[in-house]
Image (tube, rainbow, N blue to C red):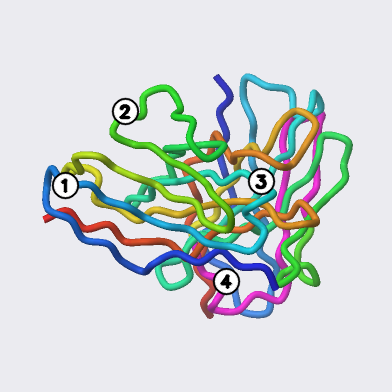
């Protein structure tokens, strides 16, 4: 059964870069599927951030596209999120997840990681 | 821009039927998936491709999609079903999109 786990700093200073890594177990991320990031905050609900295919092609939420980069490290079976110039509104629980089907991003998001709480504060 | 619209809240008594809707102009061409979100927990997929239940999801959860609206129905809602529910689909470019969420209260 595929498992995902997020890791990274829980506190980021305003204007700096948020960096998170997702480690995938029991599935090789270069074998297909899209791998994505989603965040949740009480006031804003769930927000899809972006995804990367096993080949390296990416899709980003237009509202975050200028600040987001999602990348792969197949040697470690990991993928990562970088979000630049953060503000307090970027404080949220960040989830990594598998998305879509082996060849398409369209489809359910499942499974999910347990989530990583990130606070943006000075 | 394309949006998915959900009612902010739905309330039912235990044993009653809860209905949560999700509307969007793109839904005639796209599947909808539904997630249950409880505080402090990761979202749980309760329905995918409009009406399919993942393993372990009770039969009281069902779904449908017609035109620009999708519906999640919980027949005989229980206290444990109290949570936020989010619909999810993809836009024309394939990007992901969540509805604003519906708080289901069972009391």
Q: Nearer the viewer, mark 3 or mark 1?
A: 1
Discs 3 and 1 carry the same chain letter: no
Part of the protein shown in magenta? A70-92
Q: Earlier in the sequence, mark 2 or mark 1?
A: 1
Q: Would you name the residue on which mark 4 appears?
A: A90
Q: Nearer the viewer, mark 4 or mark 3?
A: 4
Q: Would you name the residue on which mark 1 appears?
A: B16
Judging from the image, mark 3 belongs to the subunit labelled A
Q: Residue at x 64, y 41 (%)?
A: A22
Q: Which of marks 4 and 1 is in front?
A: 1
Q: Do the residues labelled 4 and 3 touch (CB within 8 Å)?
A: no
Residue B59 disc label = 2
| In-image side of B47 versus A94 (left or right) | left
Q: Residues within 10 Å of mark 4 (few under 14, many from 20)?
A: some
Residue nearer the viewer, A65 or B87: B87
Helix, strand or loop at label 1? It is loop
């Amino acid at each position: 059964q595929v498992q995902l786990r997020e890791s990274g700093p829980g506190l980021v200073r305003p204007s700096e870069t948020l960096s998170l890594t997702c480690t995938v177990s029991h599935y090789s991320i270069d074998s297909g599927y899209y791998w994505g990031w989603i965040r949740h905050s009480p006031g804003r609900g769930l927000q899809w951030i972006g995804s990367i295919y096993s080949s390296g092609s990416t899709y980003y939420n237009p509202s975050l596209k200028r600040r987001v980069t999602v990348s792969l490290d197949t040697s470690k079976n990991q993928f990562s999120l970088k979000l630049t110039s953060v503000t307090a509104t970027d404080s949220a629980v960040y989830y990594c997840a598998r998305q879509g089907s082996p060849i398409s991003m369209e489809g359910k998001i499942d499974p999910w990681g347990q989530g990583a709480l990130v606070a943006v504060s000075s | 821009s394309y949006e998915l619209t959900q009612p902010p809240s739905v309330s039912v008594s235990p044993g009653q039927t809860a209905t949560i809707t999700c509307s969007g102009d793109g839904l005639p061409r796209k599947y909808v998936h539904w997630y249950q979100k409880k505080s402090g927990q990761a979202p749980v997929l309760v329905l995918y491709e409009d009406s399919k239940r993942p393993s372990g999801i009770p039969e009281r959860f069902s779904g449908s999609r017609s035109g620009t609206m999708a519906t999640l129905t919980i027949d005989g809602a229980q206290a444990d079903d109290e949570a936020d529910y989010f619909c999810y689909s993809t836009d024309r470019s394939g990007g992901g999109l969540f509805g604003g969420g519906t708080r289901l209260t069972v009391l």
